[in-house]
Image (spheres, helix red, strand yellow):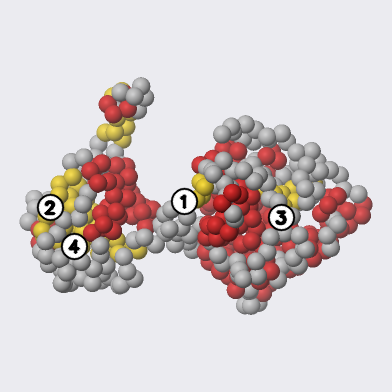
C-alpha cells in the first residue's frame, strides 16, 4: 500500500455562537471527566496543535462530524454543534479514548497487513468498516457505563457490552455476524465508518505526515505518564467512587499482562547481550538472494537449557509448539550452546541444538509418560556437566517435585497458575489482549 503524506486539513473559524458552545463543551468535559480533559490537552493539543488552532481541537469542514488521526481531534463545527451539550461531551470523550487506546495506529497496522490478529493466535481478514465499528462499540459502552456525557442517537451501540471487552474479540464477533458476501478479504473494502458519528483517519493526516512516520511516533512511556495522571485526577473527582468501567480501563492500560514470549525475551535480554553484527562479512544465507545482510557475530546468551515436561499432563504437541515459538527469540539472543532435555521422572532424551532453526521443528521425546514429575534428574544432569547454564527455561504445568534453588537463573514457562518456590514464572499461552 502507498504511504504518502496526506493533504493537510482545511481549518474553520467558529462563529460567536459556536465559540460559546465550544467553551461550554470544554467546561463540561472538565467537570464530568477531568482526567480525559488532561489527556486531551497534554497528549494531543499540547504536543501537536500548538499554534495550529486556537481551540483544543482542530475545526475543519473536511470531516463529517468528528475524527482523529492519532495526533489531533478534528471537529466539523457545522455538524458537531447541532448536538446538545451532553452529546458533544460524549463525542469528544469518544475521540479521546480512541487516542488512549491507540486505535488509529492499530487500524493502520491492520490495514497494512490486510488481516487482524486475534487473541487466540489466529487472524481474520481485515475489513475497515467492521474494525471502526468494533472500536466504537467498545468505547461507547465504556462511556455509557461511566456516565460521561450522553450518547447521541447516531452511532454504534451494544447494551450487552460494558466496555471491558478486547477490541479484537469485538471485531471477531462483529465480523462473523456479517453475511459472507459482505466480509472483507483483507483489502479493507467498506472504507470509513458508516453508521458512526466519527471516523479514524490515517495517522498524522492533520499534520501532513506520512502514516508510517506518524504511527511510529507514538510514545508508550509518555502515554503511561499521562494516563497515570489522568487516573489520579479521575479518582480525586470521584472521591473513591470511580465507575468500574473506568477503573478497568486504567488498570488494563497501566498494568498490562505481558504476552509470555515477550516476557521471556525481556528476562533473557537482562541476562546476556545478543552479540553483534559484522558489516564486512555478509550472511551467506541472504547473499544467495542478492541481499546484503551483515553476519551475526558473537554469542550473546551463553548456554541455555530448556526442559520439556513429558509427564503426560501437558500434550507433546503443545510443548513442541511452545518451543517452536521460542525459535525466534533464540535466533536473536544467539546462545553459545542450546540444550533441550526431555524428562518426567528421568531424563529420557537430550537434544543438543546446533542449528537454532531446528527448534522450530522439534518433537517432544519421552518414554516414561504419565506419573509423577521431578526436577531432580534434570538438575542432576546439569550438575554433571562441565559448565553451568546461563539460563534455564522449564516448560511444565507446575506439578513437579522441586529440588533446592540452583545457582543459575530459572524461568518456569507454566501452563497453569500453580505457585513456584523460586525462579521467574511466565504463564504460557496467556496472550495479552489488545486493550
Residue to which mark 3 is pinned: 196
At x 52% / y 60%, what residue is drawn?
169
Q: Secondary structure at mark 3?
A: loop
**In the rendered structure, which disc, 4 or 3, sits on the residue that comes first in sequence?**
3
Residue to which mark 1 is pinned: 123
Mark 1 Cα within 10 Å, few/some/many (few <14, many 20+)?
Answer: few
Furthest toward the right, the residue is 16
Residue 66, position in %: x, y?
A: 75, 51
Mark 2 → mark 3, Cα distance in angstroms: 58 Å
Mark 4 Cα within 10 Å, few/some/many (few <14, many 20+)?
Answer: many
**In the rendered structure, which disc, 2 or 3, sits on the residue that comes first in sequence?**
3
Residue to which mark 4 is pinned: 310
Mark 4 → mark 2, Cα distance in angstroms: 13 Å
**In the rendered structure, which disc, 1 or 4, sits on the residue that comes first in sequence?**
1
Mark 4 vs 2: CB contact within 8 A: no
**In the rendered structure, which disc, 4 or 2, sits on the residue that comes first in sequence?**
4
Residue to which mark 2 is pinned: 350
Residue 97, position in %: x, y?
A: 64, 58
Give the side of residue 34 with respect to residue 174, left or right.
right
Mark 2 Cα within 10 Å, few/some/many (few <14, many 20+)?
Answer: some
Mark 4 vs 3: CB contact within 8 A: no
Q: Is residue 4 above or below residue 31?
A: above
Amino acid at each position: 500500500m502507498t504511504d504518502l503524506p496526506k493533504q493537510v486539513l482545511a481549518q474553520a473559524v467558529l462563529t460567536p455562537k459556536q465559540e460559546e458552545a465550544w467553551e461550554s463543551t470544554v467546561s463540561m468535559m472538565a467537570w464530568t471527566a477531568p482526567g480525559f480533559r488532561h489527556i486531551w490537552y497534554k497528549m494531543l493539543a499540547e504536543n501537536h496543535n500548538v499554534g495550529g488552532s486556537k481551540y483544543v481541537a482542530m475545526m475543519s469542514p473536511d470531516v463529517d462530524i468528528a475524527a482523529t488521526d492519532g495526533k489531533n481531534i478534528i471537529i466539523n463545527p457545522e455538524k458537531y454543534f447541532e448536538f446538545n451539550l451532553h452529546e458533544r461531551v460524549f463525542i469528544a470523550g469518544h475521540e479521546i479514548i480512541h487516542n488512549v487506546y491507540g486505535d488509529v495506529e492499530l487500524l493502520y497496522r491492520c490495514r497494512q497487513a490486510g488481516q487482524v490478529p486475534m487473541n487466540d493466535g489466529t487472524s481474520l481478514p481485515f475489513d475497515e468498516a467492521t474494525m471502526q465499528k468494533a472500536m466504537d462499540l467498545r468505547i461507547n459502552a465504556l462511556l455509557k457505563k461511566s456516565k460521561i456525557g450522553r450518547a447521541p442517537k447516531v452511532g454504534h451501540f451494544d447494551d450487552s457490552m460494558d466496555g471491558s471487552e478486547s477490541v479484537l474479540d469485538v471485531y471477531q464477533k462483529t465480523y462473523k455476524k456479517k453475511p459472507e458476501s459482505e466480509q472483507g478479504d483483507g483489502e479493507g473494502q467498506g472504507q470509513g465508518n458508516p453508521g458512526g458519528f466519527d471516523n479514524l483517519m490515517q495517522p498524522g493526516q492533520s499534520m501532513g505526515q506520512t502514516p508510517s512516520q506518524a504511527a511510529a511516533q507514538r510514545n508508550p512511556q509518555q502515554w503511561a505518564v499521562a494516563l497515570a495522571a489522568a487516573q489520579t485526577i479521575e479518582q480525586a473527582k470521584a472521591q473513591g467512587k470511580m465507575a468500574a468501567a473506568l477503573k478497568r480501563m486504567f488498570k488494563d492500560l497501566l498494568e498490562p499482562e505481558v504476552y509470555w514470549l515477550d516476557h521471556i525475551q525481556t528476562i533473557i535480554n537482562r541476562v546476556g547481550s545478543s552479540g553483534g553484527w559484522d558489516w564486512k562479512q555478509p550472511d551467506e544465507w541472504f547473499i544467495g538472494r542478492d541481499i546484503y545482510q551483515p553476519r551475526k557475530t558473537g554469542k550473546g546468551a551463553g548456554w541455555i537449557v530448556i526442559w520439556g515436561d513429558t509427564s503426560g499432563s501437558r500434550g507433546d504437541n503443545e510443548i513442541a509448539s511452545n518451543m517452536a515459538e521460542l525459535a525466534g527469540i533464540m535466533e536473536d539472543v544467539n546462545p553459545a550452546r542450546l540444550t533441550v532435555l526431555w524428562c518426567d521422572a528421568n531424563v529420557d532424551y537430550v537434544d543438543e541444538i546446533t542449528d537454532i532453526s531446528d527448534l522450530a521443528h522439534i518433537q517432544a521425546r519421552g518414554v516414561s509418560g504419565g506419573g509423577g514429575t521431578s526436577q531432580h534428574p534434570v538438575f542432576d544432569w546439569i550438575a554433571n556437566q562441565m559448565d553451568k547454564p546461563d539460563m534455564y527455561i522449564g516448560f511444565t504445568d507446575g506439578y513437579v517435585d522441586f529440588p533446592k534453588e540452583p545457582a543459575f537463573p530459572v524461568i518456569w514457562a507454566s501452563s497453569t497458575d500453580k505457585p513456584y518456590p523460586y525462579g521467574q514464572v511466565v504463564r504460557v499461552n496467556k496472550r495479552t489482549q489488545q486493550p
